[in-house]
Structures are given as structure tokens and as C-alpha cells.
Amino acid sequence: MSDKLENMMMQYLPSDKVIKISGEVKAEVVDEQPEAEELPEWLLSQDLLDSRAGLKNCGSAEVYLNAIETFADSSEENYELISRYFAEKQTEDYTIKVHALKSSARIIGAAELSTLAARLEKAGDERDIETIEAETPKLLKDYKQLSDMLRKGRAEAAGDKSDLPLIDNDYLSEALSSIKELAASFDYDSVNYIMDTLGGYSFPEEKSGMMEKLKTAVMHADWDAINAALEN
Amino acid sequence: MENNLLLISKGSSFMIDALTKALKDNNINVIHTEPKISELEKYKDDPGVFLFYLGNFVDEISDVLVFLKDMCIEYDKTLCVIGDATEYSVMTNSIPAEYVKEHFERPLDIKKVSENMQEVLSVNDSLSKRKKILLVDDDPTYLTMVKAWLDEAYRVVIVNSGMQAITYLANNEPDLILLDYEMPVTSGPQVLEMIRTEAATSTTPVIFLTGKSDKESVMKVLALKPNGYLLKSMGKEELLKSISDFFEVNKVKTL
């Protein structure tokens, strides 16, 4: 609409009938494509996954990076489970895990791994043991290669953590008891907020195993595992 | 500022920090002060709402408690209190319970405190009317991604197994459950059955999340009569629109 027409309308219409919408609001709605420049260089320069596709799936760099973190953190345990179910021929559990991998690999932009997982999920549903036997080694190999790359890239980007200050024992105890209290109401945001604060510290050796377990449990939103980690 | 809240607490702690963050996220402006007469005196005019975070110091400050009670009467302050049964009981020796608008027990449910404080402050914000969604999925990548999407418009709780969903539902009533169809140990259909047979949750809407879009799989999901199903391959905008449409249609149905 031209400015002239707009001004004329504002002049003749009763003021309570006119709601002004500024151009800025419109710009906000249009400008929703996340920018790849916001991603770290190590993620853009590797060729095991399409980080631009992943970014598009997630809708923003923040959500995408969080998805990468979660994928990398859960990969070790998940890899072991798929290997075990495959070795023990537990096709039903195997299929469920491969199904989840199909979805999470797609989210982060690992299309090939996702497609292979989809094929193996179908084989699992159809009890097509031949395909499972033939293609699972490749799935495991690709999955490991991708998660190793993600963990390495992340660790290098995070830098040397050995210079973080050692946490005070009372401070740690208070943090842990707060997390325990918050876990009773399934308050993920507050638990994460405290975990972020703890991320700025290093921990005494006897606590580091427990902290690793707690970190993984929080990453998985696994409330049972959060409580179990805090039991000790 | 209309949304001012005076948070009275001694020292700092992770719980107070987390509480402050949650209140701020709910558009409440938090002013911190210590339980001292010289400090409280500064707040005769504003804010009108006090949130008192009790601790084991409470039996050493009876003069402050009496001062606080007088302030509530004289300046018409609304007093809300966080504290365990013992702390609260000590406090009520000086400030009788009828002067307390809300008492939040421990373990503290920060989300509940934020919501109630919004109501007390009459925060005119759609945040306070946000629907609650329980999201259940064993894949942490999907779970945290979708939580981040939904956080823009809803209050979201996430759990990573069917049994944790049942535990949550024992004490909470979400407006909608988004339930992964395929999960290990307790599957989506098993969780749905438990939800439907439990009186408290029998009418809570459940929408299945499924990764399979072929006709046979979809028919299998629909045979269980959920309130809907959504494909896990849906992008953010499509998913948010589907859920918003669901609430719209549901609103019409319940009118």
C-alpha cells in the first residue's frame, strides 16, 4: 500500500479501527531461514553429514547444535545396543533402535546413514535376516565414523578443559541436591541451567564418573537415570 | 513496572538462581533482598508482591518476621512463601497462615511457582495461559529438538520412556500427550492403554508420533484410537501448526 493511501485512510477512519503494523514485524516473519554461517567451522568443513540440511531440519543453529550434541552424546551407548541386539539376534529390539537412529540421523543431516537405517528397519519389520546380516556391519561402521568425528570436532572446539577451576565440595553438593529436588517435578530447563553452571568447573577424580553419568542422563532426559546417578 | 516481585532470600543458591531465571522467563521482574528490617523498609511502596524463600535461618529472625507481618497489613502486601513444613511452622508463629497467599512446599516445583506468581501478579501475558504438553520419546535427539520447537508456544515436559510418562501422569495433568509410537520396553500403544484405563487420564488427549508413513502402519496406529498422529519427519512449522489446529478443534468440541 502506498504511503499516501495509508495516510488518507488513517485520516478518515476512526482511530480505534486502525491498527498500525510496522514493517519490522513483517521482516521478522519473512526472515526465518537459519544461516549456516552461525555453525562452527569444523562442522561445515566435514563431509560425513550435510550440516545445511540438518540446520534446515532443526530450524535454528542453536537447536541444530544441541541436536548434534545429543546425537554425539548418545551415540556410544546406542552403538553398543545396536551391536548387542544384532549379535544376539534380538530383531525386535534391534529394529526399534535402528528406527530411532533413522530419525535422529535424518535430523542432523546424515541422510545416507538415515536411509541405511530405514532399509534395516524395514528388514527388521519383515524379519529379513539376510539383509540385516549383510548390511548391519556397514551401518555400525558408518555410525561409528560419524559419531567419532562429531565427538572429536566438539572436543577440539571446546579446547583444553584442564584449566577449569576445581569445584568446591559444598558448592557441588548444593548443586546436586538442587538437581535432585528439581527432578521431582521433571523440570528440565532448571536442571539444564544448573548443569550449564557446573560446566564451568572441573571435578575431583572420585566425582568425575558420577558427573559423566549425570550429564548423559540429563542429555537423554532420562529422569530415572538422573535420580540413579544422584543416589551415590 | 507492574510485574515486580520482591524475592526475599538469604545468600545465593542454585535453587534461588534457577527460580529467578524461571520467573524472569515468565516476564516477572525479580528484585532480590535479604530478610533484614533495614532492607525490607525500602520496599514499602513497591513491589506489592513478596515471595519469601525460607531457610533454616528462620528461627533466628523473629523480629524480621514481625516486621514483615506489619508490612503486609499496613501496606497491603501479598505474601507468598517457599519452605518445608518445619520452616513454615516456625514462620507461622510470627506471621499467621491467613496472611500467606500461597505456600509452596519442598521439593520445590519451580514451574508451579512461576505459574502461580504470574496469576498473583496478574501478568497479562499469554504465557500464563499456555497449554501443557508431555512429550515422550526414547530418541534424545528428537526429544530435545521438538522440545525446543514447542517451547515457543507451550509449556513442555519431556521424558524418555513410557514408564516415566506414567510416573509423571500420576501427579500431573497435561493438556496433551505427544507419544512416540515405537519405544523399547514399554511401547507407545502400551502407554496409551495405561493412560486410557486410568481414571485421571482417561480423557487426556494423546497424539502418536510415528516415523512410518505407509498406509498399513498408519492404519495400525489409528486402530488404537488416539486423538491423532503426527509424522516424525514433519518440520517445525508443520508440527506447530498441527498442534495448534488440534487445540483449536478441541476447543470447539468442548464448547
Image (cartoon, coloured by chain):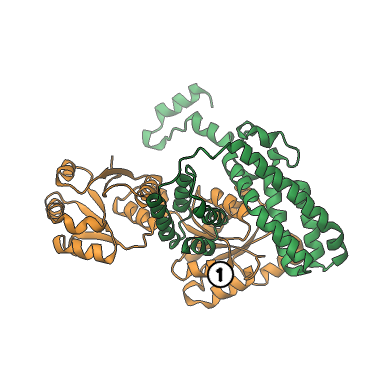
Chain colours: A green, B orange
Q: In x, y percent, where is residue A21?
A: 47, 33
Can residue B198 be spotted in the picture? yes
Image coordinates of residue A213 in percent, x first then y, are 55, 57
Chain bearing mark 1:
B
- Which residue is pictured at 70% across the width and 62% down the height? A81
The outermost residue toward the top is: A4
Q: Amino acid at mark 1?
A: Met
Residue at left 70%, top 43%? A149
Q: Nearer the viewer, residue B86 or A61?
A: B86
Residue B109 appears in which quarter of the rendering? bottom left
Q: Secondary structure at mark 1?
A: helix
Q: Position of residue B159 (x, y in %)?
A: 54, 61
Q: Out of B205 and B194, give the one closest to the viewer.
A: B194
Question: Does B201 appear above or below B108?
Answer: below
In the displayed structure, does residue B191 sit left or right of residue B84?
right
The reply to whether residue B232 is in sight is no
A157 or A106: nearer the viewer: A157
* Residue drawn at the location 60% of the way across and 42% of the way down: A65
Q: Please give the residue where the numbered disc 1 appears in the rendered image.
A: B163
Q: Quadrant of the N terminus of chain B?
A: top left
In the shown orientation, is residue B123 left or right of residue B137?
A: left
Residue A8, given in percent of the width and then of the height, sits at 45, 25
Q: Is residue B46 left or right of residue A32?
A: left
Q: Residue furthest front?
A: A205
